[in-house]
Image (spheres, rainbow, N blue to C red):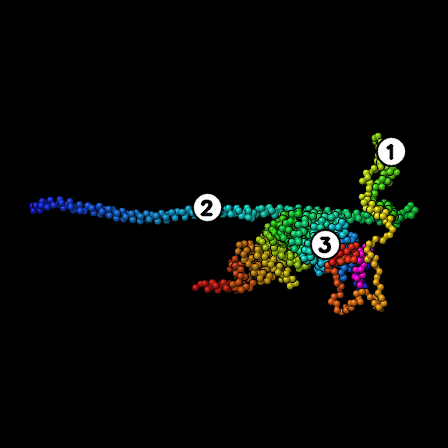
Amino acid sequence: MVAELATRPQNIETLQNAGVMSLLRTLLLDVVPTIQQTAALALGRLANYNDDLAEAVVKCDILPQLVYSLAEQNRFYKKAAAFVLRAVGKHSPQLAQAIVDCGALDTLVICLEDFDPGVKEAAAWALRYIARHNAELSQAVVDAGAVPLLVLCIQEPEIALKRIAASALSDIAKHSPELAQTVVDAGAVAHLAQMILNPDAKLKHQILSALSQVSKHSVDLAEMVVEAEIFPVVLTCLKDKDEYVKKNASTLIREIAKHTPELSQLVVNAGGVAAVIDCIGSCKGNTRLPGIMMLGYVAAHSENLAMAVIISKGVPQLSVCLSEEPEDHIKAAAAWALGQIGRHTPEHARAVAVTNTLPVLLSLYMSTESSEDLQVKSKKAIKNILQKCTYLPALEPFLYDAPPNILKHVVGQFSKVLPHDSKARRLFVTSGGLKKVQEIKAEPGSLLQEYINSINSCYPEEIVSKFFPELQVCALFRKFMRTP
Amino acid sequence: MATLARLQARSSTVGNQYYFRNSVVDPFRKKENDAAVKIQSWFRGCQVRAYIRHLNRIVTIIQKWWRSFLGRKQYQLTVQIQRRWRGYRVRKYLFNYYYLKEYLKVVSETNDAIRKALEEFAEMKEREEKKANLEREEKKRDYQARKMHYLLSTKQIPGIYNSPFRKEPDPWELQLQKAKPLTHRRPKVKQKDSTSLTDWLACTSARSFPRSEILPPINRKQCQGPFRDITEVLEQRYRPLEPTLRVAEPIDELKLAREELRREEWLQNVNDNMFLPFSSYHKNEKYIPSMHLSSKYGPISYKEQFRSENPKKWICDKDFQTVLPSFELFSKYGKLYSKAGQIV
């Protein structure tokens, strides 16, 4: 009865006031097994609701009793007891530590070897919540010998058990490279890779998260994950209906691609870039973020890979993300990725500039609403692209509304390109760029002044003076001084 | 004449003088000659050497110029060769432009292929989902129709969906016509869990001829061929099992045998209580203290007589807990048959 009441959260407050904990504790020691099971179930639900109640469970010394009887009772009791342990362990690391201290890990591992899949599921869930908090607890779980049993659980036919076992492995592997190595040594990667084809969405989501946690730590681990032949199957997950599956799949690809150029090359050769770009196009919000970062990492490694990203039509998609997304951190990631693509050679910078992203980046940098991270990243991106950009029509708007530190680079680029290209010179004059350049006030002797001088020297004196009669006066004065 | 005479007078001595003068000079002549030769040879040697040195210098200069000329030619050639080689190397191995173009083309083709494959996959998934949805809808409609079967129109009374004012009946009407009426759920017959050997034997008896629910149609074509006598066939098919002794026993027969033995022994028991050998096991009575030992509210326990408890002095509210289990040194005290095994 108490267990049924405890399913409703409103009742829990009243129950707590009625001092139900001590009652339940005595009921746990009852002779009739059904009463014990129901009492354990009620305890579990109470602890699940609120972490004060979970602390109360720990304080009333119920845990040792549970652990002791877990070893010998029937499977319903084991399920209920594992449920209680899970509910207590999920709230905070201290509570999980309390569970570990009373020796629950060994009994939970014994439960993992039980025949009934429900018991295994409950035990695996409890282990997962314990291992989730920090690395020491995960290490304790691994020391209790849970990992090989979890790998066996993954191979079971029940889908719920597979899900929980995969999520437990993912939570263990995420803390440190050694733990991830332990998971890989138990042979988990091959089984996880096989199960990607399973149609169940939640299972795929957990498997992909497990694989990405394993591969994020080091190059060797990432290579091992790749050797399990996940490409091109992972790309089909990018087309799944479920948002989380897409997000985790792109996270996995990002973790693999970020380590070395060879791995990125592998991803590109398998057609991963196109799939990720499509995935970015079809999602919104935070789901896009891993995909954007993946493109940035791939482009950062080498210029050939950046070129591959460009020809897969990545730049228009990224600029769409940059302008559409409301969140600042996603914009910052998109700005960073564009900077990585455009910084290699003039070809790359031209490809970025053609899509009219530079004004957007500039506006993001200048606006006071954007966060500091966004401003820093957009400034770096602009700088990197500008240093290589020779596409003058994109640079011209910068002359008008750029702050001085960026203006310096813009004018520098003009001064590099204009002496060589006569058509560009004509365009520059007709579009009013020359006039604008003259209007820039720069300290004599500074770099900016030098650039302006070199631009002016490309043009014959008359044109320069057509805009500025005072310059004509200067020229006459100079001539006058020269003649003796 | 006088000179002649003088000369004649001297002539004898002239010869001597002449001879002496020559002979005196002789030893020195060689020496002087040698000396002169030496000096001359040295001098000539110096001359020649100076000349050779001069020649050497000139030759060195000429060779220098010649070699530098040769070297410059060689250098041009070498530089040309190296220039071409370096260009070739860069173009072919370090940054092969055409290879890069090819690679990018291949990448874009792979991308297109992957995009197409993924789109097909997505379409397939959509189709499957739609199909599943349709099927679910069908099943639901079918179930609904079966539940509402009673709304079907009869000859006398037109049903709800078959209004006489309509030109043709509602599609639900047709659905109802097609649906089979739902029957009440009968309580499921409890199946026997254990299929022991006796069941098998029972089902092989000649009476348990398996009958199918639907009889075969009467005007079926006769099956071809000479058939064996039906009684023979049935006899053969339902020949009773003759199991060996080992197979005839149930799998948990050991447990069953033990239970049976225990039951038989229990029959022979006089008393159900277990025989407790030692007198101290019977001593269950509680000690009832005298009046002046008991307090107002009941007999106080043995400990309370001597100890007074002061809860305010307690440092923690928990009782002592057994950290280590007690060892069995004194558990057999007073309960052994003999005093031989007792530990001091």
Identify the residue under disc 1: B231
Which quarter of the picture shows residue A333? bottom right
Q: Which three-letter amino acid code belongs to the residue tagged 3?
A: Asp
User: Does the image show residue A291?
Assistant: no
Q: Residue at x 86, y 52 (%)?
A: B272
Identify the residue under disc 3: A106
Q: Position of residue A67 (x, y in %)?
A: 75, 56
Measured in 3D between alpha carbons, the distance from the residue under mark 2 to the one under mark 3, in whole angstroms, is 81 Å
Q: Residues within 10 Å of mark 3 (few under 14, many from 20)?
A: some
Q: Secondary structure at mark 2?
A: helix
Q: Secondary structure at mark 3?
A: helix
Q: Between tags 2 and 3, which lies in front?
A: 3
Q: Position of residue B340 (x, y in %)?
A: 76, 55
Q: Which three-letter amino acid code belongs to the residue tagged 1?
A: Thr
User: Does the image show residue B25?
Assistant: yes
Q: What's drawn in magenta, residue-wise?
A: A19-41
Relative to B109, is A107 on the left or the right?
A: right
